[in-house]
Image (cartoon, grey):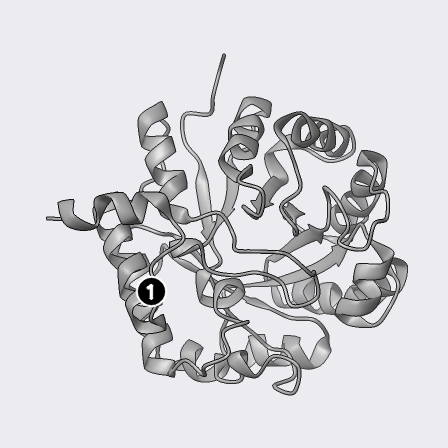
Amino acid sequence: MSYPASVRLFEVGARDGLQNEKEVIPTEIKIELIERLVDAGVKAIETGSFVSPKWVPQMADTADVMAKVTRYDDVIFSVLTPNMKGYEGAISSKADEIEIFSGASEIFSQKNINCSIDESLERFKPVVEAAKKDGLPVRASVSCAFGSPFGEEITPAMVADVSKKLFDMGAYEVSIADTIGVGTPIRTKLVLDAVANVIPLEVIGVHFHDTYGQALANLHAALEVGITRLDSSVAGLGGCPYAPGATGNVATEDIVYMLDGMGIESGIDLNKLVKTAWFISDFLGRPPVSRVAKALKNKLD
């Protein structure tokens, strides 16, 4: 079996991981989390989102985070931009790239952003056009690509269709997301094969939740397909407020441990990463979801 020699991890803990926390997390803690991730070797980080504070109050300080965090020539700070107002926030905060999103589930789309899938794509067209004009890279994701929290059938063809529309619109990367964590390795390969039939394999990313304990197995299947763009969340933080039953993202440190054991380069220092997982978990007052973080806690340098 041939695997990629190296992968790029996209860290979502500072946004996707924290957005559902009920306690308001101080800006300084978010910045320290990001700084620690960078020190561990993470080169691509989702630092926040420019959405209405009414809907996601935890992200109300994204502009402050972006203004105060240390910038690096080789580190990408991404922000989620659901509309033109969000895009203006991204520009004013000097984000390195923006993120847009759609989904394979019509019901999820209605509950998440109050519109159909096609309407969501139309909403993003002016955002992408503005980004092209300003020379700002656009990253996209497709939610509920492996199953819907509302019982709809999600076929690989449906995922491929949305993925192609996002790619054709101008996204340099399209992340295929298992929002509720129901995927299995065979399902993962079927979906990714369908997507790879309509857009280049090298632009496809994956985003797994570990609801049923399948995330690492699914990631392994994605590596077998040739995927090199992996989303992850330090300490396994996160969930989805619009997907009932969705638990956290797959933990960055669990992925890095697996990659290290497979001889696949990620550029990330596992020791520092585990310390970072415990830093944010200690602040939140609960242990990391990550088994690797728990196993290595007493073995840190």
Q: Residues within 10 Å of mark 1 (few under 14, many from 20)?
A: some
| Image location (x, y in percent) of residue 95 | 50, 70
Q: Residue at x 62, y 56 (%)?
A: 246
Q: Residue at x 86, y 43 (%)?
A: 153
| Image location (x, y in percent) of residue 16 | 54, 63
Quadrant of the rendered structure where residue 118 is? bottom right
| Image location (x, y in percent) of residue 250 | 48, 47
Q: Which residue ends up furthest to the left in the rendered image?
A: 301
Q: Is residue 89 above or below residue 205?
A: below
Residue underneath mark 1: 281
Decide if residue 269 is in sight here.
no
Q: Secondary structure at mark 1?
A: helix
| Image location (x, y in percent) of residue 121 | 82, 60
Q: Is residue 238 left or right of residue 274?
A: right
Q: Residue at x 76, y 51 (%)?
A: 166
**Residue placed most toward the observer, 290 or 79:** 290
Q: Which residue ends up furthest to the bottom in the rendered image?
A: 54
Q: Residue at x 55, y 71 (%)?
A: 20
Q: Is residue 89 above or below residue 170?
A: below
Q: Which residue ends up furthest to the top in the rendered image?
A: 1
Q: Is residue 166 above or below residue 7?
A: below
Q: Is residue 140 left or right of residue 28?
A: right
Name which residue type carries label 1: Ser
Q: Is residue 223 above or below residue 78?
A: above
